[in-house]
Amino acid sequence: MNDADLPLPPAGLEDALRAIGRERYHDRHPFHRLMRDGHLTRGQLQAWALNRFRYQSAIPRKDAALIARLDDPAMRQEWRRRLVDHDGEDGDEGGIARWLALTDALGLDREMVVTGEAALPATRFAVEAYVRFVAERPILEAIASSLTELFAPAIIRDRVAGMLANYPFVDPSALAYFDRRLSQAPRDSGFALRYVLEHARRADQQAAVLAALRFKCDVLWAQLDALHHAYVAPGHVPPGAFRPDGDGC
């Protein structure tokens, strides 16, 4: 569906959003497929987990930036659940702690992971671009950019099944982050989708939310591009970035 065909009825807009996911979501990326099919080394998995933490740890910052801009208390309350999901609350660990359990299980130094200093430059740039987008763009676009969560359950199931089948050093406890996301992502994306379909009625608004979702897909794709370039082929690891031991990377 081309932007020139807008405005669309809500069902048509939803179809256009989902078509973006089918075309651009990072489950189509070669790095994801290598991971799923068991073709990565332990060091390459470490690099993925370390760099992905940079993204995971930024999610509460981008959500807090959006909350600060919301005038409606009900909207703030709804979006606050995302902060709790990642940061935890009242003794219940959040997604960030569960991701660190994965990096621990992969043998990564926790301080190195948390500081993010060994993350790829492209990872840092992509993540900060997303945080700025949500903080600065109109609220409708900021919310639309979260709609990659519509496609998350499928890639999570794919990733977890592949990792458990192909990497003996990964066990289910190390992948606990993904268990929660299988229920959280549909809840969050359902709310965001309803909001977007209700508020994006004009042609320019619909074009903007479609562009926002494309942008977010690009953010995720760029991170895997950087990993593939540094740790698969041609294997150019930037100065200061993580270097796996003994992998020949």
Image: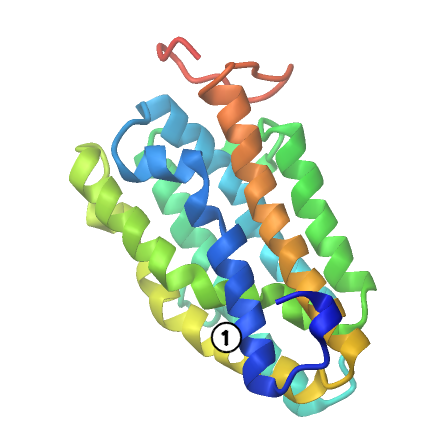
For disc 1, the neighbor class at 10 Å (few under 14, some 14 to 19, many from 20) is some
Q: Which residue occupies 42% across, 35% down?
A: 30
Nearest to the observer: residue 176 or residue 4? 4
Q: Which residue occupies 42% across, 48% down?
A: 27
Q: Position of residue 46 (x, y in %)?
A: 40, 30
The quarter of the image holding the N terminus is: bottom right
Residue 95, visible in the rendered structure:
yes
Nearest to the observer: residue 64 or residue 230? 230
Q: Amino acid at mark 1?
A: Asp
Horizontally, residue 203 falls left or right of residue 219, namely: right
Q: Which residue occupies 65% across, 70% down?
A: 144
Against 129, residue 64 (above or below) is below
**Corner quadrant of residue 95:** bottom left
**Residue indicated by mark 1:** 188
Q: Which residue occupies 44% across, 20% down?
A: 232
Residue 110, visible in the rendered structure:
no
Q: Position of residue 186 (x, y in %)?
A: 42, 74
Against 93, residue 73 (above or below) is below
Horizontally, residue 2 falls left or right of residue 55, namely: right
Q: Secondary structure at mark 1?
A: helix
**Corner quadrant of residue 124:** top right
Nearest to the observer: residue 128 or residue 205? 205
The quarter of the image holding the C terminus is: top left
**Corner quadrant of residue 246:** top left
